């Protein structure tokens, strides 16, 4: 993608949200590797929200332009509250899934799973007592029956769920976002015209297939029993 100065308002919003999402995804990985699972869950929750907002912007270019034009913290906060609250975002995702012909059964299953995970991961930001306690004393990755100090970093059995949620959030965006970035959508031209000779775009196409295949292969994979915060 070109520099932000060369893009229109909608394209700038997509550019910015994709970049912000990449930063959050890297943060999740590094935090998990550092043994800080609860901060990783907070980053994963933000990542999911950013990716879903980006999908909404790809679907509604006018909404994306409004986001780019927000000035100041108050106006931005109002924008998120009015246009990207939980109910509004659900409507965007429903409309997008319908427009691309996503199987209704799969859509319902994915939405139910995601809602449950978001409710759990939100406790990393506004924790219950058990959620805060697990940020202090976590289940050991070596033996989930043993607890160890987590506030300075400790490999946690809970991180499997954190990484699982993160990978599926990225996969969901890769499926829907890819189609709207590189293809015409609702009569509007693609954000980026697909150039099969461009090496970077080739990597994007290959990466999308890799993410999809890995998620399918390990969709129900569990190393540890299900852990709740």
Image (cartoon, grey):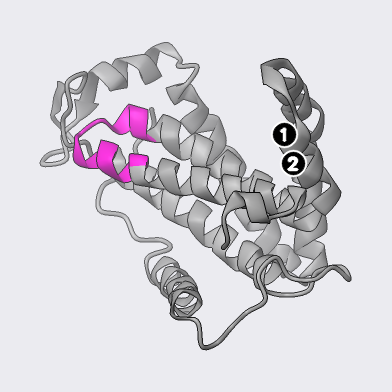
Dominant secondary structure of the magenta stretch? helix
Whether residue 204 is situated above or below residue 16 in the rendered picture: below
Which residue is at the far front?
5
Q: Is residue 15 above or below residue 177?
A: above
Element at label 2: helix
Question: Count the marks: how many?
Answer: 2
Q: Is residue 111 visible?
A: no
Query: Which numbered tag is attached to residue 86?
Result: 1
Q: Nearer the viewer, residue 39 or 58?
A: 58
Q: Is residue 149 magenta?
A: no
Tell me which residue sits at (43%, 66%) in the image: 215
Q: Is residue 123 above or below residue 219?
A: above
Q: Badges 2 and 1: C-beta atoms under 8 Å apart?
A: yes
Give the quadrant of the C terminus.
top left
Q: Which residues are magenta?
A: 27-40
Residue 179 locus on image (x, y percent): 67, 71
Residue at numbered disc 2? 89
């Amino acid at each position: 993608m070109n520099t932000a100065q060369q893009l229109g308002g909608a394209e700038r919003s997509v550019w910015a949200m994709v970049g912000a999402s990449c930063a959050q995804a890297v943060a999740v990985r590094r935090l998990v590797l550092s043994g800080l699972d609860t901060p990783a869950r907070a980053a994963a929750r933000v990542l999911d929200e950013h990716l879903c907002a980006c999908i909404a912007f790809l679907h509604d270019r006018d909404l994306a332009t409004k986001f780019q034009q927000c000035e100041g913290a108050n106006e931005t906060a109002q924008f998120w509250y009015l246009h990207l609250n939980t109910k509004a975002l659900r409507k965007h995702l429903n409309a997008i899934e319908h427009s691309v012909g996503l199987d209704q059964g799969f859509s319902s299953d994915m939405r139910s799973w995601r809602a449950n995970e978001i409710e759990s991961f939100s406790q990393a930001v506004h924790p219950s007592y058990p959620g805060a306690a697990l940020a202090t004393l976590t289940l050991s990755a070596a033996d989930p029956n043993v607890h160890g100090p987590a506030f300075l970093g400790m490999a946690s059995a809970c991180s499997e769920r954190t990484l699982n949620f993160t990978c599926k959030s990225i996969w969901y965006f890769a499926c829907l976002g890819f189609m709207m970035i590189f293809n015409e959508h609702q009569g509007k031209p693609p954000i980026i015209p697909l150039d099969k000779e461009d090496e970077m775009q080739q990597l994007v196409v290959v990466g999308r297939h890799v993410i999809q295949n890995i998620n399918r292969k390990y969709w129900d994979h569990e190393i540890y029993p299900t852990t709740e915060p």
